[in-house]
Amino acid sequence: FSFKALFQPKKTPDDELNQAQREAIVDLLNYCSFLGDKITASESEFIDSLPSELHWDESTDFDFYENQSVGIVRGVLGSQGGVENFLKGVRDRLDSEKSRALALALVDKLIRTSGKTTPEETEAREAITRALR
């Protein structure tokens, strides 16, 4: 018997996703959080909780990936046709029905965290739903 096991960090149950799918979900949620004028504290807290909700690969630093994702999203928002290509890339990585359903559920949850839904969020939600089908 070893006491080492008693001091291991609590593991998140396996979500049956691969890391590319988890990263696509983070990209999608960062995209949604940047739709408004500013990111609300509740949106930021929601995204920060993802490593404990998803079975994030410990070999990939979540904070590093999230910063990379934010850079991608900012570039997408400022480019012609960027959103369509971005959503296509997310769809390609979310290659199972389960991953797409989870992504849509998390998008809905994120949009609701601020307490009110903006027209931009509604439009984005519709575009995301079309892209993931």
Image (spheres, grey):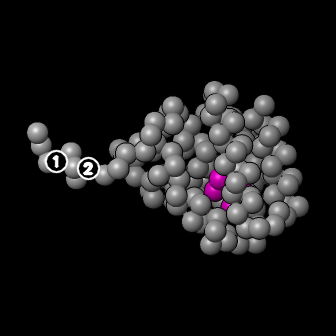
Mark on residue 74? none
Residue that label 1 marks: 4
Query: Could you tell me the amino acid type at mark 1?
Result: Lys
- How dense is the environment of label 2, judged by Cα within 10 Å: few (below 14), some, or many (20 and up)? few
The percent coordinates of residue 72 (x first, y second) are: 61, 53
Residue at x-position 67% and y-position 28%: 97
Residue at x-position 65% and y-position 53%: 29
Looking at the figure, which quarter contains the C terminus? top right
Q: Is residue 50 visible?
A: yes
Residue that label 2 marks: 8
Question: What stretch of residues is rendered in magenta?
Answer: 29-33
Q: Is residue 36 above or below residue 129?
A: below
The percent coordinates of residue 50 (x first, y second) are: 53, 53
Q: Nearer the viewer, residue 111 or 70?
A: 111
Disc 2 element: loop
The percent coordinates of residue 65 (x first, y second) are: 48, 52
Residue at x-position 40% and y-position 52%: 61
Main SS of the magenta segment? helix
Q: Nearer the viewer, residue 112 or 40?
A: 112
Q: Residue 111 sits in which quadrant?
A: bottom right
Q: Is residue 71 visible?
A: no
Q: Nearer the viewer, residue 5 or 87?
A: 5
Query: Could you tell me the amino acid type at mark 2?
Result: Gln
**Whole-Å distance between the Cαs marked 1 and 2?**
7 Å
Point out the residue furthest to the left here.
1
